[in-house]
Amino acid sequence: MRDWADKCALYRYRCAHCGKETRNPDKGHMDPNKGAGIDNLIPLCPECNNWASDDVIFGTDGRIVAVLSERFLKAAPPEVLRRIRAWLGGQGL
């Protein structure tokens, strides 16, 4: 991957998380604990980048692979928490 334009083209100018078409996507960090190198960036629509903040780690497919902050869970709607509990098998939440 050479640059940001190549990365956006790879994702067909869509948000990596929600799939919304966006011609001017935000540079979302897959892992906010790592630098802003092209290998750690994915295109996100402003809405997804805003709620994700530094609270989650994304995989290259835009799916959340880790939650870094309790703040994310406290702010999540009840339906999201139910889905997380089901995915985790009801453990820990």
Image: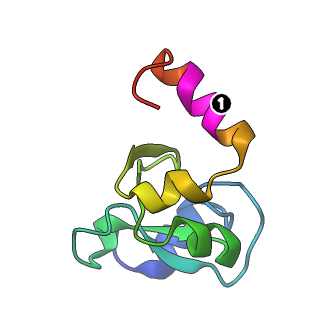
Q: Residue at x 22, y 76 (%)?
A: 35
Q: In the displayed image of the protein, which residue is found farthest to the top?
A: 89
Please, is residue 24 above or below residue 7 in the view?
below
Q: Position of residue 87 (x, y in %)?
A: 53, 22
| Of the pair 3 and 42, the residue shown nearer to us | 42
* Residue labelled with disc 1: 82
> Tag 1's secondary structure?
helix
Please, is residue 65 above or below residue 29 in the view?
above
Please, is residue 2 above or below residue 69 in the view?
below
On the image, which quarter does residue 25 sit in?
Answer: bottom right
Q: What is the span of residues highlighted in magenta in the rendered image?
A: 81-86
Q: Is residue 82 magenta?
A: yes
Q: In the displayed image of the protein, which residue is found farthest to the right?
A: 21
Q: Residue at x 53, y 65 (%)?
A: 52
Q: Left or right: where does residue 71 sit relative to residue 79? A: left
Q: Position of residue 6 (x, y in %)?
A: 48, 73
| Of the pair 31 and 70, the residue shown nearer to us | 70
Task: Look at the image and tell me in which quarter the N terminus lies.
Answer: bottom left
Q: Residue at x 77, y 62 (%)?
A: 20
Query: Given the image, on which type of amino acid does mark 1 rest?
Result: Arg
Magenta segment's dominant SS is: helix
Q: Position of residue 50 (x, y in %)?
A: 60, 75
Q: Left or right: where does residue 63 sit relative to residue 65? A: right
Q: How many marks?
A: 1
Q: In the displayed image of the protein, which residue is found farthest to the bottom?
A: 24
Q: Is residue 54 magenta?
A: no
Q: Position of residue 41 (x, y in %)?
A: 39, 69
